[in-house]
Image (spheres, rainbow, N blue to C red):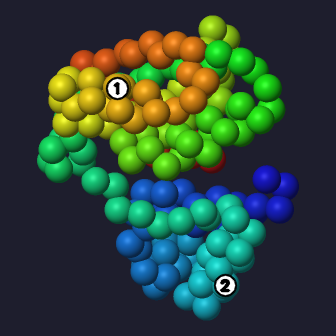
Amino acid sequence: MSDLDEIDLKLLKLLQQSGKLTTKEIAKQVNLSPTPVYERIKRLEREGIIKNYVALVASEKVGKGLIVFCDITLKEHTKEIGHQFVQEVMSVKYVCECYNISGNYDFRLKVVVRDMKHYQDFVLNDLGSINNIGSAHSTFVMGVIKHDYAVPL
């Protein structure tokens, strides 16, 4: 964070609002010419501060209207079993996010599926195929109040 100056932070804020802004549009908003803005953005990408550019898709408009947070407890807690779980869950299609958490559970998954029947199939076939899951606790999202991908700067 110490290497980021005020201009870098402005660039990041603008790009988090819209990754489709042109260098020229960004330059105008930060009062620089396009060339230094381009060079700064490339540096932020090189340094891994900007990880990627994506299109945010409205899940319900593509037939994925159910969001579920699934809290997982592993049967055993060894390094190998933890790594194996992580490798296996990374390849599960409907898991959009996975967090290693503290507390009563080991991992929290964000799962996006069509409906309850689809989630049941996911639990039985996808989660059921992962070794060493001791328990899974599901929390169903009834409504999204705030959903922001931007990192507060």
Marks 1, 2: nearer the viewer: 1
The answer to whether 106 is drawn above or below residue 84 in the figure is: above
**In this view of the protein, which residue sits in the foreground, 130 or 26?**
130
- Looking at this view, name the residue that lies furthest to the top: 104
Measured as percent of width and height from the top left, residue 126 is found at: 40, 35
Instruction: Kindly identify the amino acid type of the residue bearing the numbered disc 2.
Output: Glu
Q: How crowded is mark 1: few (under 14 residues within 10 Å), some or many (20 or more)?
A: few
Mark linked to residue 124 = 1
- How far, Cα to Cα, is label 1 from label 2? 49 Å
- Looking at this view, name the residue that lies furthest to the bottom: 35
Q: Quadrant of residue 111?
A: top left
Measured as percent of width and height from the top left, residue 28 is found at: 48, 78
The answer to whether 58 is drawn above or below residue 113 in the figure is: below
Mark linked to residue 39 = 2
Measured as percent of width and height from the top left, residue 42 is found at: 65, 80
Q: Residue at x 49, y 82 (%)?
A: 23
Q: Which residue is drawn at 54% across and 57% down?
A: 13
**In this view of the protein, which residue sits in the foreground, 141 or 119?**
119
Horizontal side, residue 11 vs residue 94: left or right: right
Q: Residue at x 47, y 67 (%)?
A: 53
